[in-house]
Amino acid sequence: MCGLVLASARPEFAQHTSERERRVHDSRLLVQPKPEVSAEGLGEFHAFQRVRVLRTFTGLRGLQILEVPAGESLEAALQTYRNSGLFQIAEPDCVARLAATVPDDPKFLDGTLWGLNNFGQNGGLADADIDAPEAWDIRHSASNLVVAVIDSGVRQTHHDLSANLWQHPTTGSHGFNALSPAEQPDDDNGHGTLVAGILGAVGNNGLGVVGVCWSVQIMACKFVDRFGEGTLSDAIACIDFARSNGAKVINTSWGIEEFSEALSNVVQQAGSEGIIVVAAAGNRSSDTDVYPYYPASLALDNVVAVAATTRTDELHFQSNYGLNSVHLGAPGSEIVSTYHLSDDAYATRFGSSMATPFVAGAMALLCAEFPAASPAQLIQRLLNGTDPLPGLQGKSISGGRLNLQKALSDGPAQTFLTIQLAPEQDWLELQVRGQPGRRFVVESSIDFREWLPVVTNQIPSGGFFAVTNSVCENCPTFFYRAVETLADGGTRSE
Ligand code: CA
Ligand code: CA
């Protein structure tokens, strides 16, 4: 009867279904008289019921909003109207709610966490956000999913984090400390605790902030010291710990500018085991297609590189970008999260480091929602679900900013062509990502007029195919495009 109560109830959201129970306005009815009923007769009937007409919609076949006198039974009045035979429609006035699951965490409710829900507060642009409340209607927790925060550690006693920390089944440890393996991965810098809170601060506990995931298992892997520095070897030890202890998503809010085969191998190994690495694009205002930043710039199908956007949906001025090496943007300025200085400390930071855990948290929810999907398929879903932004067009693979609600829903299938130069730079790899089953021809041109086919292939179940092409120093500049080939021999350009 009340079609306006939105959102589907799912078993795991049992605590919210009670809030969604049908509610009706306590003194109003909606009625539409039958066409043959005269205005005079209608007026008399209302007067006899002592009902007041609040509004008549003349353009809506005379639909009326009625007010039942105080103290009268709404239910009885409704029956009287239905039984009168005078009305085509006689309904209660249902209370509509936005299709949004809203947690009680104060910094969410007061608008501090603009990246999750931006209604234009503090100079922001309305809806320059990841549509978290709408997404949380679909899923807000990934309780069994392990996300490794490879960083400076996590304050393990923080009131807004401790319930969401992973625990080693035998030792009870919350992670791994590569700097001092006998010790817990405590945070003496703050960076890791900020990252952890963005992706997974405890939601709906009446405290502080809420993570993209309200409930998740955060594995703290420490390789960064209190000065904000760590070594590649310790980072690799952390990735290996995460890989061998059940992490499904790894957050790397850091990077190095030199290519490391060892780092590439350990990330690739993680990918072969279904683990997704969500990596910061870096904060040097530079193009990572030209100046790579690893692990973000690794051309592996389990790596997602994230740039930082602002509360007005622009690329943050310090964020790196890259048409072929940065996948998407996510909120990364004026981000408030948990901090390491006390159990109820919070702090504000900016940068792709803060944007990355928005995507890692989103990825955790996607993994929980689509457990059979491969890393490449989940990344494809993430890219399909972005909101296009002018500031990210030509500066990222998707051209858009994370939209969690779209990523969790079935968005339109999109196709992306990316080009990566091999580290030795004598060949390049072209990747075509899209909906499995669709066929594409990759074409090249030197003048945008004549296009020659390079290869035709079908997108396999993994979500992309790759082609390599050699490059030479004195050749002209080649441009590439992917064109869909349809079953009837026609084409549809992409
Ligand atoms: Ca929104
Ligand atoms: Ca909280």
Image (cartoon, rainbow, N blue to C red):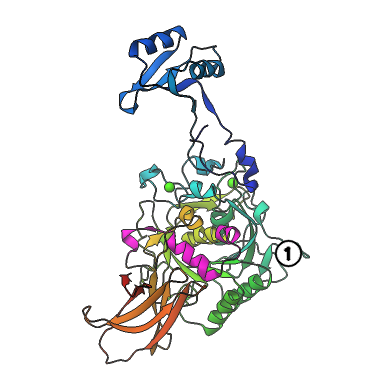
Q: Amino acid at mark 1?
A: His
The percent coordinates of residue 126 (x first, y second) are 37, 45
Q: Is residue 474 left or right of residue 376?
A: left
Disc 1 C-beta below 8 A from ligand 2 = no
Secondary structure category for the residue under label 1: loop
How many tags in the picture?
1
Instruction: Name the residue tied to disc 1.
Output: 168
Task: Say which quarter of the image contains residue 227.
Answer: bottom right
Q: Residue at x 42, y 55 (%)?
A: 333
Q: Residues within 10 Å of mark 1 (few under 14, many from 20)?
A: some
- Name the residue furthest right: 170
Say left or right for 490 vs 92. left
In the visual, does 11 lie left or right of 366? right
Seen at 34% across and 57% down, the residue is 314
Check the image and report above or below for 216 versus 27: below
Segment colored magenta: 365-393
Coordinates of residue 144 in the picture (x, y in percent): 67, 58
Q: Is residue 384 magenta?
A: yes
Answer whether residue 249 is visible to the viewer in this image: yes
The residue sitting at 42% across, 89% down in the picture is 424
Question: In the rendered view of the protein, which quadrant contains the C terminus?
Answer: bottom left
Q: Nearer the viewer, residue 19 or 248?
A: 19
Point out residue 407 in the picture as x, y percentages from the top left corner. 48, 58
Q: Is residue 207 above or below residue 22?
A: below
Residue 394 rendering spot, x and y as whole percentages? 32, 68
Decide whether the magenta segment is chiefly helix, strand or loop. Answer: helix
Establish if 443 lies above or below 148. Answer: below
Residue toward you, 57 or 87: 87
As for residue 78 lying within the magenta part, the answer is: no
